[in-house]
Amino acid sequence: MEYLIKTNNLTKKYKNFKVLDNVNLHIEPSSIYGLIGKNGAGKTTLIRIICGLQEPTNGSYSIYGISFKDKKIYEEREKINAIVETPSLILNMTAKENLIHQYKIIGMPSLDGIDELLELVNLKEFKNKKVINFSLGMKQRLGIALSLATNPDLLILDEPINGLDPEGIIDIRELILKLNKEKGITILLSSHYLDELSKVASHYVFLDKGKLIKEISAQELNQYLRKKVEIEVNNIKEAVKYFEEKNIDYEVLNNSLVYLYGKINISKIILDLAKKNCLVKDIKEKNESLENYFLKVVGENND
Amino acid sequence: MTKLIHANFYRLKKSKCFWFLLVLMFLSGIYIYLNFNGFHPERCVNCSNELGSVLFQFGVASYIILPIFTTIFMSPLYGNGIIKNMIIVGHKRTDIYLSNLFTIIIVNLIFALFFLLGTILTSLIFISDITIPINKLIFLIIDLFFLIISYASLFNFIALSFNKISNITVSFITVIWGIITCSNIIGKYETCTSNNLCNIYEFILKVLPIGQGFLISNLTDNYKFLSIYSLIFIFIINYLGIFIINKKQIN
C-alpha cells in the first residue's frame, strides 16, 4: 500500500534534548488520524517536520513515497496542506482577499471557487469583513478554507479547536467529517480534547516524550473501550468452560481474571459458577474512556 | 517564483504603508529641492548643478524610508505565518527569498521615480537645469540604480533573517548607525589632507551602501567603480540571506 505519509525513525534533537525519538508513522489515505499526546510530546514538531518547516536530525520521511530529500518533494507538498498552531492570515485584509492572496501563492489561473470555499466553511456572509474583526472560530474556519484552496489529499490540523467555544468546536468537527466523507480528504488532527477526537478519528497515534508508543485503529480501540465486567475467580478452567457453554463473550487476562462483554446477568453467572465449585471473588464494572486508555498507554511507556 | 511575486504585488496593492510612503517620497523630492535652493523661487545664478545636487539625494533618503516599508510590509511574513504557508504549499525557500527581494527592488525603484518626479516637477516651476557632465551623470545614474538594489538586498536580508521584533530593532540600528557613521566619515573625507587617511575613508564609504549613498548624493568624482562595490555587496548579502533562510527553523 502506498502511504500518504511515512516516517522512518524520525528523530529531532534540540541541542541535547530529544523532541522526537525514532518515530515510525504511517498515514493511510482517506482516514482521519488523531494525534494524541501531552504538552511537549512532540506533536507539533512532528507536524512541522512533515510540512517542511523544520529538518529532522536523523531519520527520514516521505510523501507518497517521495523522500523529503528528493527534489520532487516540492511537487508532493502541493498535495498536502496544514494549519500549524495558528492559521496564516493577513489581518488587515478581508476573508475574500486572504483567499485571493492564497490563490495567487498557489498560482490558480482564475478566482473561481472562492465563494464556494467560503460557503463550505460558513463564512460567505463575512467575506468582505476584515479578518482582524473575526472571532477565533472564524479565523480557524478561514484557515481551513485557505488550506482547501490547494485541493489537498491530506489536511493537517494542529490543535484546531483550542480556545473555541462549544459551538465552534461542533462547527470544526462537522467540517472535518464533511471533508473526509464528501471530499475524501485524509486528515491528521492533533488535539488534547480526546472526547472530540473520539467522535471523528478512524485511527489514533499516541505520542509520549517524543516516542510513538501506539498506533491503533478506532475499530481496535473501540474493542478495547467497550463496556465490560471484570470478574476474579478461583477456578479459571471451570469459568472458561461455563462461558463457552453459555456463549458469553469473554477474554481471559490471567489465571484468575476474566473480562465479560455484552449484556450479562451477573447474579446468575455467580450462582452457576458456584455450583461448579468456581467462586467469584470480585466483580468490577469497567467503562474505559479514551482518556483512561491514553493514561494507561503513557503509563506503560514510563515503566 | 512568479506565483510568489504575483502574491506579493497583490499584497502591495492593498498596503496602505506603500501608498503613504509613495506620496511621502514625492513630497520629499519637492521639499529637498526647495531646501537645497533656500526656498528662493528665483533662479540661482551663481550655483551650479542645482537640480543635479538634488536628484541624487534619493541615495540617502531611500536608506531611511525603505526600512520603514520593509519592517511594516514584511512583518506578516513571519509574524502572521505567510512564509510558513508558502513553504507548506510547496514553495522553495530560495524562491521565497528571491521573490521578496524582487518586490523590494521594484518598490525602491518606484520610490526613486516618485522622488525624482517631485524634484523634477518642482525644478520646472523654479527653472533649474542640470550641469553635470553627461558622462558623469550616466555613471551616477547607474551607481544609484545598483545602490537601490543594494538597499533592497540589505533590508530584505534583515527582514527575512530575523523575526518581527528583531527586524524592527536591527533595521533601526542599521539606519541610525549607518547615517551617523557615514555622515561623520564623509565630513572627514572631504577635508582630509593625508593620502592614506583619505583612502581609508573613501574605502569605507564605498564598501558601505549608505556610504555610497552619501558619495552619490554629493556627486562624487570617484563614481566610476562604485557599481562594482555594490555588485559585490549584493552578491554577498543575498548569498548569506539565502543560506540563512534555508537553514532557519520555522515555528
Image (spheres, rainbow, N blue to C red):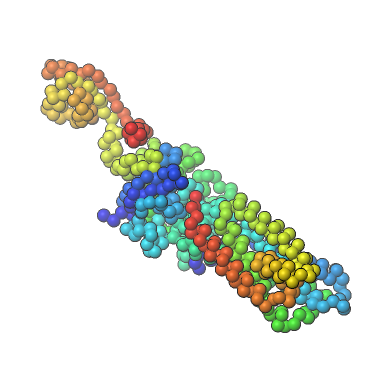
The residue nearer to you, when weighing B205 against B33, is: B205
Residue at the image point whose x is 27% and y is 34% from the top: A224
The part of the image, by quadrant, that contains residue B18 is: bottom right
Where residue B83 sits: x, y (%)? 51, 57
Residue at the image point whose x is 49% and y is 52% from the top: B250
Q: Residue lying farthest bottom?
A: B134
- Left-right relation of A140 to B68: left
Where residue A37 sits: x, y (%)? 40, 39
Residue at the image point whose x is 36% and y is 52% from the top: A59
The answer to whether residue A253 is above or below residue B238 is above
| Residue B178 can be seen, yes or no | yes
Where residue B212 sits: x, y (%)? 69, 69
The part of the image, by quadrant, that contains residue B55 is: bottom right
- Left-right relation of B165 to A189: right
| Residue A30 can be seen, yes or no | no
The residue nearer to you, when weighing A279 against B178, is: B178
- Left-right relation of A267 to B251: left
The part of the image, by quadrant, that contains residue A223 is: top left
The answer to whether residue A228 is above or below residue B230 is above
